[in-house]
């Protein structure tokens, strides 16, 4: 059953299946269900924005190592909570720096492994409208948009960046209704399926849409940088395969793939 709550111009949708909504962009929960050299898969928790890129990286890693990797994808906040509740992940690829830092501070992750693997880029996307960035941005004030999607800012870093952006633009109380996705993957699905007119997504997702429609890449003068960090979790501190995966993630070859997927690298 789907529940909708309307409060202050914001609709919060509960009870939707992320898997059914985000199949096209690879978000939701998915996995490579095989074992590693010891009969168990390396388990990697991945923020939903990075899920399509992570699957490509895992495919290359498996081919080069004969290892097996399982990917679980959700919002960074949800994955952080699952890790603290004992979820058996080995590596966490967050969409922010805050949660990996907290896991280190709280004793759940290895401090020396905590590194930025990508910088995310926020995009405002209106798929059914042509025009340049200026045209797209003006639509936010025009009153023509009735429903605009964004990720839940309490658990999704891209949603938090969106909230900062709306505040910076003077749209804390916008003329449109905000539709909250559980994560940025579900948010993309709302827009892609036509359930809302526009929304704030990751630049990597806009590339998946073949850059159709009108898009405005939101600069970091409107929100804090989206520094996405990866960290080795304590349960895998002696897991050579987990450390090898992180080395692979930060390798120049993999970093080039990440950049090609719509992200900025750590030194940009």
Image: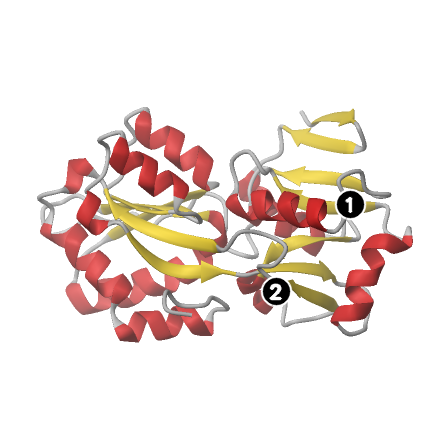
Residue 8: name its quadrant. Answer: top right
* Label whose residue precedes the other's in the sequence (2 or 1): 1
* Image location (x, y in percent) of residue 234: 18, 37
Which is more toward the observer, 149 or 101?
101
Q: Is mark 2 on a helix, strand or loop?
A: helix
Res 27 seen here: yes
Q: Mark 2 points at which residue?
A: 206
Image quarter (top left, top right, bottom left or bottom right) of the C terminus: bottom left
**In the drawing, what numbered circle is on residue 208?**
none
Q: Confirm or deny contact between disc 2 and disc 1 (CB under 8 A).
A: no
Residue 251: name its quadrant. Answer: bottom left
Which is more toward the observer, 95 or 36?
95
* Image location (x, y in percent) of residue 109: 23, 38
Residue at coordinates 45% horizontally, 68% vertically from top-left?
Answer: 264
Res 88 seen here: no
- Return the residue found at the far right: 143
Residue at coordinates 50% horizontally, 55% vertically from top-left?
Answer: 225
* Image location (x, y in percent) of residue 3: 70, 25
134 sits to left or right of 54: right
- Visual colour scheme: secondary structure
Q: Name the residue under label 1.
A: 171
Residue at coordinates 65% horizontally, 43% vertically from top-left?
Answer: 163
């Amino acid at each position: 059953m789907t529940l909708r709550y309307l409060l202050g111009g914001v609709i919060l949708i509960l009870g939707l299946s992320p898997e059914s909504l985000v199949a096209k962009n690879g978000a939701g929960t998915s996995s490579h269900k095989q074992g590693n050299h010891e009969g168990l898969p390396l388990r990697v928790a991945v923020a939903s924005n990075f899920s399509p890129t992570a699957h490509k990286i895992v495919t290359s890693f498996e081919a080069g190592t004969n290892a097996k990797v399982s990917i679980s994808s959700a919002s960074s906040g949800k994955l952080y909570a699952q890790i603290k509740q004992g979820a058996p992940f080995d590596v966490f690829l967050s969409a922010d720096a805050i949660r990996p830092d907290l896991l280190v501070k709280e004793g759940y992750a290895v401090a020396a492994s905590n590194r930025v693997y990508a910088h995310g880029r926020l995009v405002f996307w209106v798929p059914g409208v042509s025009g340049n960035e200026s045209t797209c941005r003006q639509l936010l004030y025009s009153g023509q948009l009735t429903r605009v999607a964004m990720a839940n800012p309490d658990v999704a870093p891209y949603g938090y960046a969106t909230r900062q952006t709306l505040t910076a633009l003077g749209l804390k109380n916008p003329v449109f209704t905000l539709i909250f996705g559980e994560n940025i993957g579900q948010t993309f699905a709302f827009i892609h399926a036509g359930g809302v007119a526009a929304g704030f997504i990751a630049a990597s997702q806009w590339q998946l849409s073949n850059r159709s429609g009108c898009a405005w890449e939101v600069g970091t003068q409107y929100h804090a940088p989206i520094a996405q960090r990866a960290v080795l979790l304590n349960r895998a501190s002696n897991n050579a395969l987990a450390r090898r995966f992180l080395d692979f993630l930060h390798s120049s070859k993999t970093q080039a793939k990440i950049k090609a997927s719509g992200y900025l690298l750590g030194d940009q």
